[in-house]
Amino acid sequence: DWTARPSRWLAVWINWYCEIPDIAAQARQLRASQKVLMFTASQDDYVPKVATESLWMALQESDATVERIDVEGLHLGVGDDSERIADLLQRSMQWMEKQGLL
């Protein structure tokens, strides 16, 4: 596809111009006092798998306490199943209680 190379160049330039931070680099800098719960969708159709794994690896390299929960299904979006959202909220609350955040 002839558009791939110009598109990639444009994306890199926009990131540079807007000074968008590298999220993985930021994640690696988390401190031991910080806690992270990361949800992932097993069939995510929005966030590329390589990006998810890159962020997860960076979180694991940090000093923070990290936990990952892989959830069946697609990436959540506007108007998605309220039962699924309620389940994620419940899991989040349980995790926060376990971490002493609530």
Image (cartoon, rainbow, N blue to C red):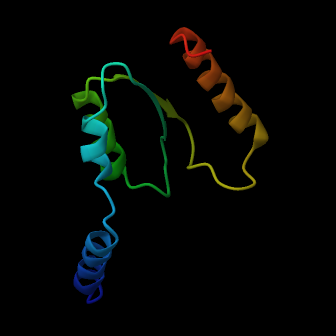
Residue at horizontal 62 percent and vertical 15 percent from the top: 102
Residue at horizontal 30 percent and vertical 69 percent from the top: 15
Residue at horizontal 30 percent and vertical 26 percent from the top: 31
Q: Quadrant of residue 48?
A: bottom left
**Foreground: 44 or 57?**
57
User: Where does residue 61 sit, x and y in percent of width and height?
Assistant: 22, 30
| Res 58 visible | no
Whether residue 83 sits left or right of residue 11 in the image: it is: right
The outermost residue toward the bottom is: 2
User: Where does residue 19 sit, x and y in percent of width and height?
Assistant: 30, 66
Whether residue 24 sits left or right of residue 90 in the image: it is: left
Q: Quadrant of residue 52?
A: top left
Note whether 74 is above or below 59 in the view shown. Answer: below
Whether residue 35 sits left or right of residue 74 in the image: it is: left
On-image quarter of the N terminus: bottom left
Note whether 99 is above or below 52 in the view shown. Answer: above
